[in-house]
Amino acid sequence: MLKEFKEFALKGNIVDMAVGVIIGGAFGKIVTSLVNDIIMPFFGYITAGMDFNKLKLVISEAKLAADGTVLKPEAAILYGSFIQNLIDFLIISVSIFFCIKFLSKFKRKEAAKEAQVEEKKVTELDILTEIRDLMTEKNNK
């Protein structure tokens, strides 16, 4: 069983997927920072300093004791956080789209180059066939 697991874990696809997950996590942190530290403050500036994370629809207010301790927490719909996560998702989606588009374009160029090289290659069989045809032609004259 250990041998089977080792074979499974060391297959190229599993390792590639693990690398992709790690890079994806790092990419997610970069995009989250982009949204939180650059884009959302810009939207906050446009909307007169409004912080999207603090936007909420309060369903029921919190109930506090006389000493300030919370007896019943506030129930609220945090739609501002949802808006920020939506912007996060859109930026990640657009970034991935452009990365895949770039890679596809690069792969198409490489495939076209390989096709040209394959067309130019003359195999031994082609040469031998040509020699045979020339010899047959010469013998027939």
Image: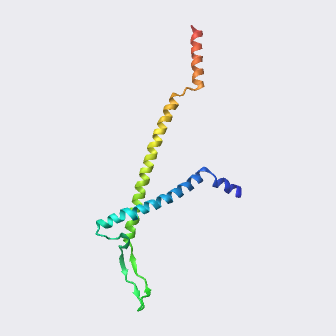
Q: Is residue 48 left or right of residue 53?
A: left
Q: Position of residue 18 (x, y in %)?
A: 57, 56
Q: Position of residue 2 (x, y in %)?
A: 70, 58
In which quadrant of the rendered image does the N terminus lie?
bottom right
Q: Is residue 73 left or right of residue 127?
A: left
Which residue occupies the foreground of this view, 51 or 60? 51
Q: Position of residue 31 (x, y in %)?
A: 43, 60
Instruction: Give the image quarter of residue 14.
Output: bottom right
In the depicted structure, whether residue 73 falls above or below residue 23: below
The residue furthest top is 141
Q: Is residue 15 left or right of residue 75?
A: right
Q: How is the image coloured?
A: rainbow
Q: Is residue 86 visible?
A: no
Residue in the picture at 47% in, 58% down: 27
In the depicted structure, whether residue 100 falls above or below residue 25: above
Q: Is residue 116 visible?
A: yes
Residue in the picture at 50% in, 57% down: 24
Which residue occupies the foreground of this view, 40 or 140? 40
Instruction: Give the image quarter of residue 63.
Output: bottom left
Residue in the picture at 35% in, 65% down: 41
Q: Is residue 29 left or right of residue 124?
A: left
Q: Position of residue 48 (x, y in %)?
A: 28, 69
Instruction: Give the image quarter of residue 36.
Output: bottom left
Residue in the picture at 39% in, 62% down: 35
Q: Tally the numbered discs.
A: 0
In which quadrant of the rendered image does the C terminus lie?
top right
